[in-house]
């Protein structure tokens, strides 16, 4: 066999095989990394959307409760009601409430803090009742968790089991105008809605916050 034929039939060297394998591995790892980042981004976006929906629901429940309370008072007195609503009275809102800022929602161990002692949520399935207990850290994302009413855990009841990763704090906003009337000293109530959770995609806990101001 001639030297030209032997050269034509020569196989790849080990160096060439390793080089090709290295290129394939680099491309494969890059694709997997990009796919993982895309999945994490989508997961975070989904969780944030669910958290915002939960916060918006709480905000709307606050507005409904205040409006209902004022309407009841107006029907009783036959005149407009410009004092504190029953809903706010029952909460015993204080001007000295120490509202948790977004910076303080994550502790030194990079974990979400527990809900403050003066916080609450509104049970949207049970006549918009105020719930001040069973406010826990989020296991998945901010939500209200209801008890299941079957063994397959397909449907849930109207019994609130816990609120996870979401809470509300209310604080009175002082009026700039001096007044001798105790109620008139405060022109509004700020409801600070907070949520904090550790995303399934990992990393630093996610925090969201919004304020609902009710002019009472």
Image: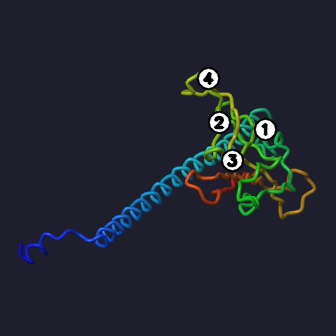
Mark 3 and mark 1: Cα distance apart in space: 12 Å
Residue holding disc 3: 166
* Secondary structure at numbered mark 3: strand
Residue holding disc 4: 149
Label 3–label 2 contact, CB within 8 A: no
Q: Residue furthest right?
A: 180
The spot of residue 7 in percent (x, y) is 13, 75
Mark earlier in primary sequence (3, 2):
2
Circle 4 packing at 10 Å, graded few (<14), some (14-19), many (20+), is few
Residue holding disc 1: 133
| Front residue of 83 and 190 | 190
Mark earlier in primary sequence (1, 4):
1
Circle 1 packing at 10 Å, graded few (<14), some (14-19), many (20+), is some
* Secondary structure at numbered mark 2: strand
Mark 1 and mark 4: Cα distance apart in space: 21 Å
Image point 62% across, 44% down: which residue? 57
Mark 3 and mark 4: Cα distance apart in space: 24 Å
Above/below status of 202 relative to 153: below
Residue holding disc 2: 145
The spot of residue 35 in percent (x, y) is 42, 58
Tell me the quadrant of the picture where the N terminus can be found.
bottom left
Image point 82% across, 54% down: which residue? 172
The spot of residue 79 in percent (x, y) is 77, 40
Mark 3 and mark 2: Cα distance apart in space: 11 Å
């Amino acid at each position: 066999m001639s030297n030209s034929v032997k050269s034509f039939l020569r196989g790849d060297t080990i160096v060439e095989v390793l080089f090709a394998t290295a290129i394939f591995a680099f491309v494969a790892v890059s694709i997997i990394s990009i796919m993982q980042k895309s999945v994490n981004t989508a997961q975070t976006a989904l969780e944030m959307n669910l958290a915002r929906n939960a916060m918006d629901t709480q905000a709307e429940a606050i507005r409904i409760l205040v409006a209902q309370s004022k309407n009841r008072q107006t029907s009783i007195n036959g005149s407009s009601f410009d004092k504190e609503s029953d809903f706010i009275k029952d909460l015993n809102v204080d001007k000295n409430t120490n509202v948790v800022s977004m910076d303080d929602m994550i502790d030194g161990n990079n974990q979400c803090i527990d809900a403050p002692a003066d916080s609450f949520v509104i049970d949207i399935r049970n006549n918009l009742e105020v719930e001040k207990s069973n406010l826990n850290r989020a296991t998945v994302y901010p939500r209200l968790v209801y008890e299941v009413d079957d063994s397959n855990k397909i449907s849930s009841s109207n019994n609130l089991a816990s609120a996870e990763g979401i809470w509300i704090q209310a604080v009175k906003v002082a009026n700039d105008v001096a007044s001798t009337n105790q109620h008139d000293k405060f022109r509004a109530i700020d409801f600070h809605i907070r949520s904090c959770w550790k995303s399934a995609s990992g990393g630093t806990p996610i925090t969201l916050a919004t304020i609902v101001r009710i002019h009472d």
